[in-house]
């Protein structure tokens, strides 16, 4: 009854809390949600908040966290075994569909990402027989992994510290190749990403309506597809790289294989000595915030630590800065520095 009336707690609906919350949101005038539900475009689309934004007033408390949350919303990090598990999931889905399954742009993107990471693995470690450093064989071909392993042993570097794979680092600053080169290297273009994102929306919705933990895979696919498309459209604001870490005594990679089954073992085909991950990092939060500001009627940021406002405006994006130029309100400090603050220098004190 509470669900039908549109009030009460979603837990009282005696059903799926996720679908109950979505149904209640459609009937509500005020919706409370975490930062990510508003700032992350992938999550907005996944939970259905996107359709509530038109003519809405978005109030963000503790807004000093907005910049980092927006960066995180436009970024993604996926290691090799996660990518392989996404590929295995899409292959299983294709087999279930049988003759009805058509070409999958989403699977194509995932496969190209996986092959790109494998190319980085080959560049960093060489063939499998060269993975381990052999000090007794001076004629053995050296690769970046050998120098990294020697450095880690000498300086006792923690196993989870990452090394950027040489030649697989794009965008940002210095003399790195532009982010466009990443998409050329991995063979990914805008048309493919557009189709992949549209397909990811369908796959994610199917996964949420299925039993078990499929919704986790569906959300990962949607997040990956959306972030890759956003990175392609806003290439100048992204840094992209492939990083490697040494597993040391950790059996993390082996446990990934065991938990994901023979299909992943076939797809992954890598030794557990080194792990690899693709990092797609958004550097400018305005990319995400501009998209949000254009959809809502008003955004109210409430925080005690946004000053100086000029720098905050620049960080939050062009569209946000344009709106904020004539409407920004800055309250006076609660404490009067002239009457309520005493500053003295104590030269000596008795103990």
Image (cartoon, helix red, strand yellow):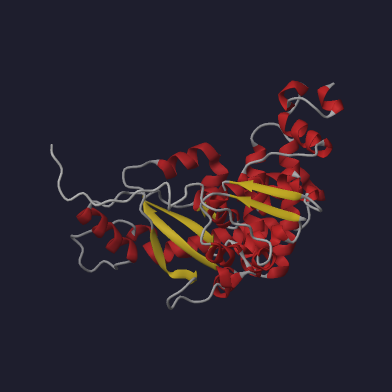
Q: Tell me if residue 173 can be seen.
A: yes
> Does residue 308 appear to the left or right of 273 in the view shown?
right
Q: Residue furthest left?
A: 351
Q: Position of residue 232 (x, y in %)?
A: 63, 68
Can you say which quadrant of the picture contains the N terminus?
Answer: top right
Depth order, front residue of 89/295:
295
Residue 232 vs 224, above or below: the answer is below
- Residue at the image position 69 percent from the left and 56 percent from the top: 106
Q: Tell me if residue 95 can be seen.
A: no
Q: Residue furthest front?
A: 339
Q: Position of residue 81 (x, y in %)?
A: 51, 49
- Residue at the image position 76 percent from the left and 33 percent from the top: 19
Can you say which quadrant of the picture contains the C terminus?
Answer: top left
- Residue at the image position 28 percent from the left and 63 percent from the top: 147
Depth order, front residue of 233/96:
233
The image quadrant of residue 195 is bottom right
Depth order, front residue of 176/51:
51
- State how many labels appear: 0
Q: Position of residue 140 (x, y in %)?
A: 26, 66
Residue 6 vs 243, above or below: the answer is above
Q: Position of residue 323 (x, y in %)?
A: 70, 65
> Does residue 125 appear to the left or right of 205 in the view shown?
left
């Amino acid at each position: 009854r509470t669900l039908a009336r549109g009030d009460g707690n979603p837990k009282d609906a005696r059903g799926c809390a996720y679908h109950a919350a979505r149904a209640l949101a459609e009937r509500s005038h005020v919706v409370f949600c975490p930062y990510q539900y508003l700032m992350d475009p992938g999550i907005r689309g996944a939970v259905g908040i996107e359709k509530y934004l038109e003519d809405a007033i978005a109030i963000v408390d503790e807004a000093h966290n907005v910049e980092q949350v927006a960066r995180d919303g436009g970024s993604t990090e996926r290691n090799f075994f996660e990518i392989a598990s996404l590929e295995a999931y899409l292959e299983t889905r294709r087999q279930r569909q049988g003759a009805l399954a058509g070409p999958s742009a989403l699977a194509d993107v995932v496969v190209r990402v996986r092959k790109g990471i494998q190319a980085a693995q080959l560049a960093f470690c060489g063939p499998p027989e060269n993975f381990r450093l052999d000090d007794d064989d001076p004629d053995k071909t050296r690769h970046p992994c050998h120098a990294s392993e020697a450095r880690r042993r000498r300086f006792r570097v923690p196993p989870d510290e990452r090394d950027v794979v040489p030649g697989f680092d794009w965008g940002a600053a210095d003399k790195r190749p532009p982010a466009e080169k990443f998409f050329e290297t991995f063979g990914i273009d805008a048309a493919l990403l557009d189709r992949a994102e549209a397909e990811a929306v369908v796959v994610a919705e199917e996964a949420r309506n299925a039993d078990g933990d499929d919704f986790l895979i569906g959300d990962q696919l949607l997040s990956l597809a959306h972030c890759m498309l956003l990175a392609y459209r806003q290439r100048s604001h992204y840094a992209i790289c492939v990083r490697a870490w040494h597993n040391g005594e950790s059996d993390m990679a082996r446990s990934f294989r065991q938990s994901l089954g023979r299909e992943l073992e076939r797809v992954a085909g890598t030794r557990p000595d080194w792990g690899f991950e693709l990092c797609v990092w958004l550097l400018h939060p305005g990319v995400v915030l501009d998209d949000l500001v254009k959809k809502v009627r008003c955004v109210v940021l409430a925080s005690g630590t946004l000053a100086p406002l000029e720098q905050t405006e620049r960080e939050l994006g062009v569209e946000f800065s344009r709106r904020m130029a004539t409407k920004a309100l800055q309250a006076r400090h609660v404490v009067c520095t002239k009457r309520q603050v005493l500053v003295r220098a104590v030269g000596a004190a008795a103990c």
